[in-house]
Every structure is written in structure tokens, then in C-alpha cells.
Image (cartoon, rainbow, N blue to C red):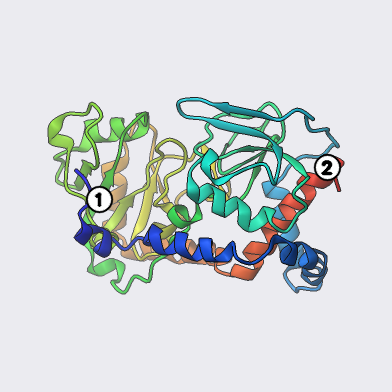
Amino acid sequence: MGDSLLYKVRSGKPVKFFDFLKNYMGLLIPDNYYRSHLKTKLEAARKRPDYEYMKKRVDYYIRIKDTWKIASTNKTEKGKSIFFYTGTLGGYTRKMFHTAYYFDQHDVTRWFPKSLRWNFCPGDVYFTPDVPTVVKSRLLTADNQNPVILKLDKLRHFLFVNDEKSFREKKDMAIFRGKIRQSRVREKFLQLYFNHPLFDCGVVGKNEGCPEQWMQPKKTIREHLDYKFIMALEGNDVASNLKWVMSSNSIAVMTRPTCETWFMEGTLIPDYHYIEVKEDFSDLPDKLTYYAQHPDKAEEIIKHAHAYVSQFFDKEREEILQLMVLERYFETSGQL
């Protein structure tokens, strides 16, 4: 089921072509310009009224406490579902991995000397690296100091919506559209609730081994917003729709997250920012029915979700935070 041009226009998602075009145009600005302004930009950040809040965010993204030394030997590992790079900032090129990750990391690394070395693992990371490594996602485990989070694959993950339809105007149902691949959570959900009257659910894209009846047409984001509840189920790592769902007047429904990104999913509070259901989904129908019958309770969750996502709206602050994270990464490795 390839995406038609009409769907791509109507989907509600950003068009990659225009984003890539903007990024290619940005390459015309010499990196020296950014490097010459780094010190001034970080000094100005210390005078911001929200600087204490920013330091807490940085502490959350990079948890390395002790000094460490990065390997002096360049290394590139490519596997079926993993890419790992050790080398200089300047040595990482666009053709090594997906273009979106190249541009996202370059937005930050261009502020630093190209000779600085780092460990970089783009893509869906569902393991804990053995060495301090810059990643998009990390597991929510106690021993996870090595993964250092940056805001990567942001065109896909950091999408927010302006939802004009109130919760009470929406259908008393939950919707799910997504791929399954290796997602045990998504497969379990569909086994239980495909064709259930409370759910409009299905698999999109290429059939990779699921029952054919599960394959359903894609729906645009606007079509998702006709439903009171939107399933935000983890795939290879986090649920990529969680950000825009929490910015809408629908409610995200999910099991407790097992990994997190720049969105800090580990700080979300169950039944306060989203509706949490058991891993076996046994309480799912009862929870949906409760919140459909108690819209005041549902609207409280929506209010809390809106407040949570609003902390990511300040583009200037988001940029500075990434610079602060990467600065600490190089400081702890003894390079700055």
C-alpha cells in the first residue's frame, strides 16, 4: 500500500522534500559562523529566567557523572537494524545513515570543532550502549548513563497539532493505525481488539506477516482527531505519534513506556498526562468507557497533556538545550 500523492498532501505530516530543501540551503552557511557564536550563545543562556529549568533538562538528557575517554580509533558498525559510529564530528557524512539524522545532528554539531570525537548511534535504539553514545532513544532502566539524548528525527517525532474539535464532540472510540514489524505490544493489541466495537484499528503499509484482514487504509491526522482516544503504542522504540496526540483534544492511551526520547517520556504520569492500560490490555475497554462517561476527568488529562507539550514549543530554548548537552558530552570526555 504505497502512499498516494493525495494522502501525502492531506496526511497532516510535514513534507520531507521541503524540510530537506531548507536544510540543504542551510549548508550554504559556513560552520565557522556557528562555531564563532557558540560561546556568546551559551553565555546569554545563563542570563535567561528559565536557566535553572534548562539545567534540569540537560541533567536529564546526559547523566554521565565521571570523566571518560573516547576511543582514538575510528569505527563504523552496520547491522540489519543498527548503525554505530565512532570518529570525529567532521567525519560523519550524510550517506552513512538516513538523511534526516544527518541534518538533525548537523544542526547541533556544526557549533563545535569538527575535530571533536563522539560515539553516535542514530535510529531506533532499544539497548544500552557500552560507551557514552549520542542517541535518539534510550531504555527506561536504572543503569542507563551511557545513552545521551539529542533531538533527532524531529520532523517525524516532534509534530504538534491545533485541534479545533473538543473532546465531547468526538467519537466514543479509540483509533490505531500503524505498522507492526517487531512490536509485541501492537500485535497483542490487534489480536484482542481488531473488529471490537470500541476500536477502529488496523495495520498500514506493507504486510509483513500479519493477518490480511488487519490491513486497513491509512487515515490522516485530522481523521484521527475525530476519535476521543488514540492508541500510542510503542513500535521499534517509542510511539512516534505521542507528541501530536498529547497536543490534541483527544487522549493518548498506552501501556507504560519502556523507552524515551527528547520528549522525556519517562517523566509522564499515568492517568494524568495519558491513560495507562495494563500490558495485557485487560482493562482497556473499561478505562475507555469510564473516561467517555466522565468527560470532565478526560478533559483534566487533556489539560495536563497540553501543559506538558508546551515546554517543547520554544525553538530558541530547544536549540540551546542541545548545545548544552553536547558541550557537557565533550567536557566529560576531556575534549573541552
Q: Residue at x 22, y 33 (%)?
A: 207
| Figure check: 221 above or below 135 | below
Nearer to us in this view, 193 or 135 = 135
Nearer to us in this view, 99 or 157 = 99
Q: Is residue 48 shown to the viewer in this render?
A: yes
Residue 265 drawn at (x, y percent)? 53, 48
- Say which mark, if any, is on residue 231: none
Residue 194 relative to residue 69: left or right: left
Residue 46 drawn at (x, y percent)? 81, 68
Q: Residue at x 39, y 60 (%)?
A: 17
- Quarter of the image where the N terminus is located: top left
Residue 12 drawn at (x, y percent)? 31, 63
| Figure check: 42 above or below 90 | below
Residue 164 relative to residue 316: left or right: left
Residue kind at label 1, given as amino acid type: Ile
Q: For mark 2, does the 10 Å Cα neighbourhood hold few (<14), some (14 to 19), or many (20 or more) residues?
A: some
- Say which mark, if any, is on residue 175: 1
Query: Disc 2 or disc 1, which is closer to the eye?
Result: 2
Q: Secondary structure at mark 1?
A: strand
Q: Earlier in the sequence, mark 2 or mark 1?
A: 1
Nearer to us in this view, 28 or 54 = 28
Q: Residue at x 16, y 44 (%)?
A: 216
Q: CA distance from mark 2 to mark 1?
A: 45 Å
Q: Is residue 263 shown to the viewer in this render?
A: no
Residue at the disc numbered 2: 332
